[in-house]
Image (cartoon, coloured by chain):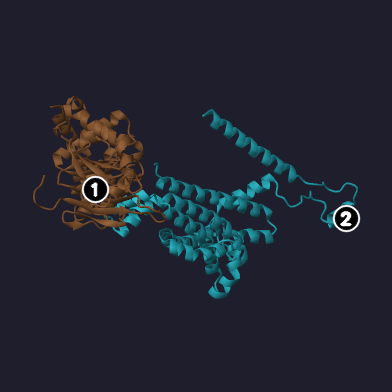
Amino acid sequence: MRERAKSWVLSLLLLAVLLFSWHLASLPKSGPATGMDPEYAKMMGLDKPKSDGLPTLSQMGATVRKQLSNPFYDAGSNDKGIGIQLAYSLGRVGLGFFLAALVAIPLGFVIGLSPVVHRALNPFIQVLKPISPLAWMPLALYTIKDSATSSIFVIFICSVWPMLINTAHGVSSVRREWLNVARTLEAGTMRTCFEVILPAAAPVILTGARISMGIAWLVIVAAEMLVGNLGVGYFVWNEWNNLSLANVIFAILVIGVVGMILDLLFGALQRAVTFVE
Amino acid sequence: MSTGLPPFLQVRGLAKRFDGAPKPVFANVAFTLERGEFVCVIGHSGCGKTTILNILAGLDTATLGEVTMDGREVAGPSLDRGVVFQGHALMPWLSVRGNIAFGVRSRWPDWNRERIAAHCQKYIDLVHLTGNETKKPSELSGGMKQRVGIARAFAIEPKMLLLDEPFGALDALTRGAIQDELTRICAETHQTVFMITHDVDEAILLADKILLMTNGPEARIAEVVVNTLPRERTRHDIHHHPHYYRIRNHLVDFLVHRSKLLQEGRAEDAANEDLPSVVRPGETALKQVR
């Protein structure tokens, strides 16, 4: 308990240091020019305190308050609340991830069960796996001809590999004796798959799913920056074009927090299927 | 035991050679088992005991020879043969009841939930695990885990039970308690049992017949020792019986000297595929004394 209190204090201290350095960095660099003719200064826009663009803490606070007070506002195609943008991004990630799971888990089962299939597919997997998902984007846009669907495809392609590889590994390393028990108890192929192999491999499969989700959340921001019009990635890019760094920083924080929540969710799921031997 | 009928279990000319090995692990293994008999196999490590058990279970296949049980050839695993594995092999994500129910559902697929639960409960009670139905294997001690393994095998009501050194990993006290339970349950259910053990005393306590295996490679069953002690025996008084030490000495002598000598000299009597010689050391010695 004391340890925990200590780490809390340390975390808060670190936060204070970070905020303080932010505060220092965002202090106005030069006050109104002193030796200058006030008329000239006004003309040149140098009469107001000039910052180098980094919002001060109070400006940041105001932006966060404003964004969070009305996260679902919709004022035209280039001006939507962060809640709506998040919903679009999460929807794309969810759909792409779900489709990937639909392909990766059954295929991983087959690869894990059959060394022949494993050897046959391995070269393809090894070549396709290291490709940056964004490299698929032009091909996707050309063939699918729809930017939203293309970003879902990119999510699909990046989340398929960790799940596929982990499922295959989990299935192929199920303890021999459990399979022997299933055989002596005349459990059929389906029962063995769903009641022995699946629960035995579930922790490893979910580790793969957790990695996939992490990657998908990384990739969606980049994909939306490319295809545009909706989502947190687009929001970041749009606010950069608006030169609103406060909004950019706010979006970055939101992306981080949502990513953390997704990871916690998968962590909880993983714990639920993990068994003690 | 001779009934004129073919024996319940018949093993003939069994041999197993693993890929790449120059000699078979065992060869010309032959023995029979009658219904209701409790048979133990004793032999040094590496003579292929577990492989023989796996072949009987249908989990492994022999290079040569055949096994018939109840008039039918053994080809593949079956609910007719319950297996208790060396390392208990419980599924750690299932509860005690779930582990036992797994086999019960295979045996009687049309039973409803209540009927399955009731059937499982009967066997949980039988191995004295009442109150632990919903516990996971990780919450149980080694002895309790092996009891679940035994209950799982008994619950499918197999024609024959195969036990692969079931008590090897248990401490002496727990082992004794479970041995007593196994004797009681086998007596109640007239179960036919084939069991591998390293423990000479365990074999004398539990078995009607003890199969002695020579060392591998090319191991075989050299002798069938008939246990002439009365069947109602307990751990506490077994060593007072006059036959006890004669049988025990015979078994220990075999393990220490003869298992190796017989392996070396196996060329002379390897040609015959007959059943191994049957000896009754308890009574033979008695006659010699007289």
Please tell me in which quadrant of the rendered image residue B177 appears: top left
Residue A35 on image: x %, y %: 91, 47
Looking at the image, which residue sits at the far left? B3
Q: Is residue B280 left or right of residue B215?
A: left
Q: x, y (%) of residue B33? A: 18, 47
In-front residue for pair B276/B87: B276
> Relative to A59, is B276 on the left or the right?
left
Which part of the image, by quadrant, shows the C terminus of chain B?
Answer: top left
Q: Colour of chain B?
A: brown
Q: Is residue A155 visible?
A: yes
Q: Position of residue B267 (x, y in %)?
A: 31, 49
Residue B82 - label: 1
Which residue is identified by label 2?
A40
Q: Which residue: 79% across, 48% down?
A: A49
Foreground residue, A116 or B65? B65
Q: Colour of chain A?
A: cyan
